Amino acid sequence: MLNKKSIDDINVKGKRVLVRCDFNVPLQDGKITDENRLVAALPTIKKLIADGGKVILCSHLGKPKGEPKPELSLAPVAKRLSELLGQEVKFAADPEVVGPNAKAAAAEMKDGDVILLENTRYRAEETKNGDAFSKELASLADVFVDDAFGTAHRAHCSNVGVTKYVETSVVGYLMQKEIDFLGNAVNNPERPFVAILGGSKVSSKISVINNLLDKVDTLIIGGGMAYTFAKAQGKEIGKSLVEDDYLDYAKEMVEKAEEKGVKLLLPVDTVVAKEFANDAPSRVVEGSMEPDEMGLDIGPKTRELYAEALKDAKTVVWNGPMGVFEMPNFAAGTIAVAKALADLKDAVTIIGGGDSAAAVNNLGFGDKMTHISTGGGASLEFLEGKELPGVVAANDK
């Protein structure tokens, strides 16, 4: 069990509080096109303001690779945050991040004020976790709060290095929620515990499958990775996505599930087409595909099978769509799983970030889930059972 100090465990009145947020939002012509990450950060920021902290926010945005790039400036984020908070968020426009504007703004802060630093990845040292930049960030703060789960699997200056030079390092509400659900709920779940894994590649989920087979009662496989399992069992999969290097691994996982008494469910039918296009003519196949066909979604019998397997679940973790959900004609499998989870009354439903989070939100089921993770890579590594540097760096209770 992870037991980290949070913002509820400290007194921030009159103190300068450096908060690492995840404001890595999509921008188009200087406008934010999806502000979910800003909204998710608000509870922590509002709490620190209410408690009289001097709040200094920092984040990365995109991959400027150590160079100031105007199109990756956080200026639009400061503007939108000001509107969401109902008070000014002063933007410190320093290309070196901790520069004269940031230092002057920090020195003039009153209790409850908020400033936002420039994109931390304008500095090349950020991703290398270099001491110099870590010290510069720490020089602005009395307290450090990490609320950026999306970067917790990386050791950077702004989430790990800085903690070496600040006495108090705690987690924010968003990070706490991720630890509670993805960490603790998975390690101590109410049963039956079902995991659903989809997406394109077995290779990206190897350690997740291995780790979850030690914990779950049922493991459901869908998406492109299912075809590697199908081929490993001798089925003809046409030109479907497959990782031939992982066929033996797929066989091993099937054997491990049997040994552990875990029910491993694989698709029993598939929606196939000859072209990777939404308007491509499709059909449902139960046996082998034709050589020129590819699987693009789980079939109707599989949807029923998976929905039935989820009926009595008390804890569900889902990472990865069941098919090419971006194409409406091949989204039925992903919709069926999302609906099955939405219909569960007394279960804890946890959606790992990335594509599955996008699918659930785009399909309108977001508010029916217990928790939707804000970190794709970080949530996967958590499910693998790995320690995340950004979580480890916070003070223990």
Image (tube, rainbow, N blue to C red):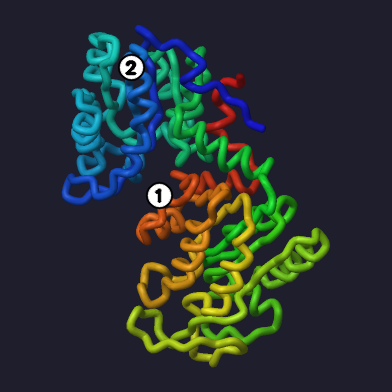
Dot 2 crowding, Cα within 10 Å, few <14, some 14–19, many 20+: few
Q: Position of residue 113 (x, y in %)?
A: 26, 16
Q: Position of residue 149 (x, y in %)?
A: 47, 38
- Left or right? Give the position of 16 relative to 178: left
Pick whichever, 96 or 211, lies toward us: 211
- Of the residues shown, which amino acid type is indicated by label 1? Asp
**Residue 50: which numbered mark, if any?**
2
Position above or below: 250 against 273: above
Residue positioned 43% across, 87% down in the render: 282
Task: Indicate the secondary structure of the residue bearing disc 2.
Answer: helix
Pick whichever, 150 or 43, lies toward us: 43
* Res. 380 in view: no
Q: Earlier in the sequence, mark 2 or mark 1?
A: 2
Pick whichever, 102 or 57, lies toward us: 57
* Res. 222 in view: yes
Q: Quadrant of residue 22?
A: top left
Q: Indicate which label's residue lies in the foreground, 2 or 1.
A: 1
- Of the residues shown, which amino acid type is indicated by label 2? Ala
Q: CA distance from mark 2 to mark 1?
A: 27 Å
Q: Disc 1 marks which residue?
A: 367
Dot 1 crowding, Cα within 10 Å, few <14, some 14–19, many 20+: few
